[in-house]
Image (tube, rainbow, N blue to C red):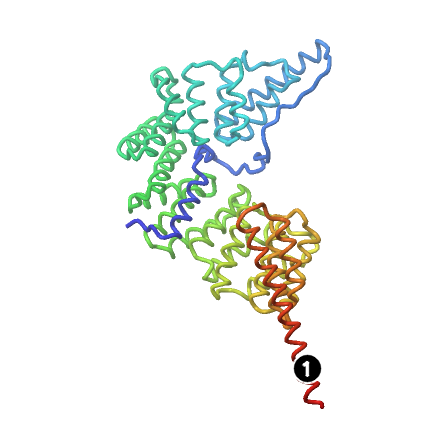
Amino acid sequence: MYNSSPHVVALHKNLQASCSALALWFFATANHSALHAAGEIVIPFVNEEVSTERVTELRHSALRAVTAADAAFAQGFTEAALRLYVQAFGDDSPLTWEDYPAKAYNYSLALLIEQHLAAARQFLGQPFVTDSPRWLLRRLLLEIQIADFEQARVVRDQIDPTALPAGERRWLHLADGWLASRRGQWVAANDAFARMIAASTGPAEVAFAELMRDFEILRSGRTDESTIAGLRSTERSMQGRRGGFEAARLLAIALYQLDRRQEAMDVLERQLRLPAIQELGMREQFLFLMGQIAGAESLRGRLALQQLLRDRTNEVYQRNALFLLTKAAQEGNGRQELIALLDELIGRPQSHPLLDLLLHTRATLQLSDNATEQAEADWLQLLEQFPGSAHVRDALRGLAISNWLRQPPRFRVSADYWNRLRQQLPPGRDRDWTIVLMADAFFSQWRLCQCRRLVQYRKAQICR
């Protein structure tokens, strides 16, 4: 039975975040994380006059790089293939893409597989790229990856499947499956994935095709025992490789959708113990998914989310992890753990990439515990060290509130911070409301002064 709780909605977002499924290159027959370099593909530019001997040497070197690139591409090492193709066809190379169209096909497909979408779009705009079926197929895959499904359907209508090489038709079947799934045509989608499986050669290609089919089933929420069995089989057959980890991730989500949370967590823990998960750069995905499935209200979930904040990982995962931990702390789960973690991260000699957010979070927790001085110290540090931070307004608002809540209150100081916040805000309701708060602070200050004068007068009367 499909679980439609908010937690599952978050897991669906986790699925959608990896919707560009071409990145799951199914030929990964060995660990090759060292071949995955960060950043966009850049073709080097060398502007120098070279001798004939140098040209011959460059040509031989480039041809060797092409041979190595072809081998890497055929074995599924697509990132390595990209680097080798760039080396072979760089600006200082005597080779051109026009002279080697088969290599251009491989290179463009590798760009799409590894999700270098900006480079793929630029490459597919080259003058030698025509409206032939093979180039149209690559444009189709690009449009799907950037989620322009309307344009993708226009491109799809121009492709004659029989005009494609047999080895590339499975990519067309994959695109057909995606498009049908987005339209809610599950029978047509299943037929397309079945054709992709039939067109695949070798166990690795078949496993990838089945993984894509299961991915769409999960995305649509149509999870059943056959889906679970298929994902378990793929996980076992590709264990320790990228496809195996992706199958395990989808398996954990599927088990959670069937209310089998413990099994889902066991799957994730088993994968987190494998050394290859770190080498392939997938550890943070699994830690965050563990935090989502186990829940930040549980110790198991909090430990996973805390580890994300301790590691040098993707800032998006870290922000989301901190949000979940803070929400749980505000509900009474792991509050002291979170404060201790924030103390640890803020106190590190090497600044944490989210230090401004960590300071704001700790200050907020301290203010709710009536530790106004400590809260103000964190917000003042945030304003001093990060004047351009997105949390400056939060800090000013916090300082205004904390000075109001002090005993005795500092209404005039609070009014000053409301005024500074007003200067930061664009015209509108929020900015206008700060004027009301400033007036209230000044009135409270006047009333406090009147009370003090009255007390002093009463004391004087008593002393007489």
In the image, residue 234 sits, relative to residue 59, either above or below, namely: below
Q: Name the foreground residue: 283 vs 5.
A: 5
Horizontal and vertical percent for residue 355?
64, 53
Horizontal and vertical percent for residue 79?
54, 31
Q: Please tell me in which quadrant of the rendered image residue 434 appears.
A: bottom right
Q: Residue at x 59, y 51 (%)?
A: 311
Horizontal and vertical percent for residue 430?
54, 51
Q: Amino acid at mark 1?
A: Tyr
In the image, residue 12 sits, relative to residue 126, either above or below, namely: below
Q: Name the foreground residue: 310 vs 143.
A: 143
Q: Residue at x 37, y 39 (%)?
A: 215
The residue indicated by pointer 1 is 457
From this viewpoint, which residue is outermost toward the bottom? 464
Horizontal and vertical percent for residue 180?
32, 31
Q: Name the foreground residue: 5 vs 169.
A: 5
Image quadrant occupied by the C terminus:
bottom right
Residue 195 appears left or right of 444: left
Q: Counting other residues with Cα less than 10 Å from the Cα at mark 1, is it few (<14), some (14-19), or many (20 or more)?
A: few
